[in-house]
């Protein structure tokens, strides 16, 4: 699969006599793919059932003559005025009861049967018009499906309420089962009939209600995608794929792997910092890994910025290194009216700044882009668990269920060491564990607060057969409905080798960080988001220092069957890195020395060579390789022998191969 650069373009906003100059300018920059029509519904269908294809056909013909290929978008994020005026009920209703109005985007209710009808109709019409065009690479449904902008990922219409009730019926079968799962006897909230169930509008709604509605919201988005995908698939040429551009990757509780099920290709919009902060580079890398892992295939970056900054080269290269088949910039030419009038490659006259053109040409000419990607990727030995449910459970408005240290903060503190040490990984959700653990040697599972007994059993079996698990506070406190276990951590108690004190249901009241001291004297900082652990078979590798946790275990290891469990009772990057190095050694997973927080590594997909990304403003030297500020390289050999499970010494820690199981040196078990 060849790599390509391209951009979004809006010919409906540009005078026709200027199209050719823009196309020539794009080609001179090395761009070869255009993403089109995402907001062009009123230009393509100015009145209901009346289509205006001629101008679009002329543009496609001209662009194809100049060597461009196309990603054709269905324009369903922005309904035309004839549709919104005739059927105002298609607009989304917020929790406050306000209905969105025309003039924006993504303000429609994807549960609306009326909107679904017209969305399927325009998708089918576009497919029939251009499916046989040989320059069309693929189809792109809607734009950044995430719910309303500047509001929670919710829709409070009658259609959404009906859809939610039907979804709950299919999941639980009876209201008795629902009541049991949600724990509705509390505050006399038991349900006696499906018609009593609304959306979780009360800020103190039970966790099960909040979780299930958020799961339904992802389901509803997926069905909207599936509806259009089915229309397109009936007419599309065999080589044309179907996708969409995901956004709100981690923070809104949307399960993008679920949304990807009816699609052929995954993709997301990778703006710097959009996937999460702090550590925006690491959040973007985690997103790349997730979208590649969803189907084990190359993914697309459908939008990214073209602004000039010191990170541009490294940022673009990391997309490619982690499996992107193409990178499309948003967008080529600035538009003169409406919103979002910046962030374009060229100004409103189509002129590209010389320094921007030089940067693009310089990066596009690099040989690292030219190697073809495989059609599918072999699974990594290491997997990283990300749970949309752990994001969702934090959406409750109940002050008693506030989480001062978020799941996403714990997540990124566990992922940064993987990226720093060049440990390639795939991203799994908890529901993927039953099918995608085979062949894995190391599983990194940060702060999986919600864990079902079924998945706990899968983890136990996998570790007993030789797997190495690295987990962190707070793990297995609640079941899949958000109900606390009688004893925190109980479904994993035998596997973890310790019990959790009642304090573990709370967070430390102190702000900042607490200290962790390891057996060899190494000291790390940890966030005040900790488990109070009493060992019961597990060996203690490090302890907290200072009140109120002074002397309590901070890091543990437990040998179970043929496998091992490592546990960080606090959340800190350096503590996670220390345990990762030990877990990788025992699992036989390669890792590399890297002292720099602002340099990322990922192995080449063949296993031969290492990508190095320098996000700092200084030149960085790793082994024999020097990387300029903001730059990148693919090093076939950078003078460093990987640690692969045979070394008995790693930085900041002492290791011994005790009893053939590779236990870390401990500081006691009590």
Image: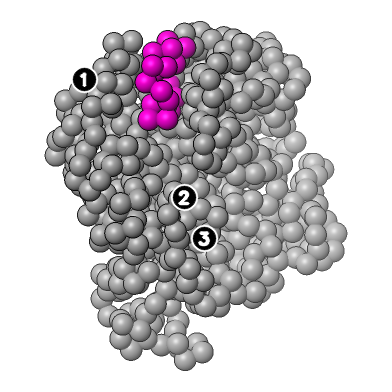
Instruction: Report crowding for label 2: few under 14, some 14 to 19, many 20 or more residues within 10 A (C-alpha).
Output: some
Colour scheme: one colour
| Residue drawn at point x = 67 percent, y = 15 percent | 627
Residue labelled with disc 2:
104
Q: In the rendered view, would you say 385 is above or below 546?
A: above
Earlier in the chain: of badge 3 and badge 2, it is: 2
Is residue 600 rendered to the left or right of residue 38?
right
Q: Secondary structure at mark 2?
A: loop
Q: Residue 538 location in percent, x, y?
A: 62, 57
Residue labelled with disc 1:
134
* Front in this rendered view, residue 154 or 535: 154
Q: Quadrant of residue 54?
A: top left
Q: In the rendered view, would you say 585 is above or below 456?
A: above
Mark in front: 1 vs 2: 2
Q: Is residue 141 magenta?
A: no
Q: Please give the count of numbered marks on the rendered protein.
A: 3
């Amino acid at each position: 699969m060849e790599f390509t650069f391209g951009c979004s373009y809006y010919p409906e906003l540009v005078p026709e006599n200027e199209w050719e100059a823009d196309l020539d300018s794009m080609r001179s920059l090395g761009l070869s793919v255009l993403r089109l029509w995402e907001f062009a519904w009123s230009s393509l269908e100015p009145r209901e059932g009346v289509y205006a294809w001629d101008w679009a056909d002329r543009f496609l013909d001209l662009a194809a003559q100049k060597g461009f290929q196309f990603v054709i978008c269905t324009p369903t994020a922005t309904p035309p005025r004839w549709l919104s005026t005739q059927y105002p009920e298609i607009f989304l209703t917020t929790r406050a009861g306000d209905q969105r109005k025309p003039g924006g985007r993504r303000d429609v209710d994807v549960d609306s049967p009326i909107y679904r009808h017209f969305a399927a109709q325009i998708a089918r019409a576009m497919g029939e018009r251009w499916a046989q065009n040989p320059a069309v690479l693929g189809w792109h449904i809607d734009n950044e499906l995430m719910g309303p902008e500047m509001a929670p990922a919710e829709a409070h219409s009658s259609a959404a309420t009906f859809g939610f009730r039907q979804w709950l019926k299919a999941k639980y079968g009876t209201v008795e089962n629902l009541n049991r799962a949600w724990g509705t006897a509390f505050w006399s909230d038991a349900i006696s009939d499906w018609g009593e169930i609304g959306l979780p509008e009360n800020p103190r709604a039970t966790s099960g209600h909040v979780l299930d509605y958020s799961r339904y919201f992802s389901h509803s988005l997926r069905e909207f995608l599936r509806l259009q995908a089915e229309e397109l698939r009936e007419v599309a040429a065999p080589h044309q794929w179907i996708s969409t551009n995901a956004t709100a990757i981690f923070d809104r509780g949307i399960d993008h792997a679920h949304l990807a099920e009816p699609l052929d290709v995954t993709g997301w919009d990778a703006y710097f910092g959009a996937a999460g902060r702090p550590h925006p580079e690491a959040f973007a890398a985690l997103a790349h890994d997730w979208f590649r892992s969803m189907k084990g295939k190359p993914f697309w970056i459908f939008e990214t910025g073209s602004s000039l900054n010191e990170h541009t080269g490294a940022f673009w290269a990391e997309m490619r290194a982690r499996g992107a088949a193409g990178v499309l910039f948003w967008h080529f030419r600035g538009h003169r009216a409406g919103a979002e009038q910046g962030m374009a490659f060229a100004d409103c006259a189509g002129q590209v700044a010389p320094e921007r053109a030089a940067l693009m040409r310089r990066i596009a000419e690099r040989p690292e882009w030219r190697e073809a990607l495989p059609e599918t990727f072999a699974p990594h030995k290491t997997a990283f668990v990300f749970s949309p449910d752990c994001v969702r459970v934090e959406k409750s408005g109940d002050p008693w269920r506030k989480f001062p240290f978020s799941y996403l903060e714990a997540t990124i503190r566990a992922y940064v060491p993987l990226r720093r040490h060049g440990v390639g990984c795939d991203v799994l959700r908890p529901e993927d564990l039953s099918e995608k653990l085979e062949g894995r040697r190391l599983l990194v599972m940060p702060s999986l607060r919600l864990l079902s007994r079924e998945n706990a059993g899968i983890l136990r079996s996998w570790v007993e057969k030789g797997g190495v698990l690295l987990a962190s506070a707070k793990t297995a406190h609640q079941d899949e409905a958000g109900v606390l276990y009688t004893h925190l951590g109980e479904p994993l108690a035998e596997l973890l080798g310790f019990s959790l004190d009642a304090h573990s249901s709370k967070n430390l009241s102190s702000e900042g960080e607490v200290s962790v001291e390891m057996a060899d004297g190494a000291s790390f900082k940890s966030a005040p988001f900790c488990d109070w652990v009493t060992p019961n078979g597990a060996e203690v590798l490090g302890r907290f220092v200072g009140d109120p946790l002074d002397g309590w275990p901070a890091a543990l290891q437990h040998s179970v069957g043929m496998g091992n469990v490592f546990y960080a009772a606090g959340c800190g990057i350096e503590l996670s890195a220390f345990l990762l190095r030990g877990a990788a050694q025992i699992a036989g997973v390669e890792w590399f020395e890297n002292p720099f927080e602002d340099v990322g590594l990922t192995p080449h997909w063949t296993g031969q060579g290492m990508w190095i990304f320098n996000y700092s403003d200084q030149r960085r030297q790793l082994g024999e390789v020097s990387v300029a500020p903001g730059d990148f390289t693919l090093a076939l050999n950078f003078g460093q022998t990987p640690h692969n499970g045979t070394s008995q010494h790693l930085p900041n820690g002492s290791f011994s191969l005790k009893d053939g199981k590779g236990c870390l040196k401990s500081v006691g078990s009590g």
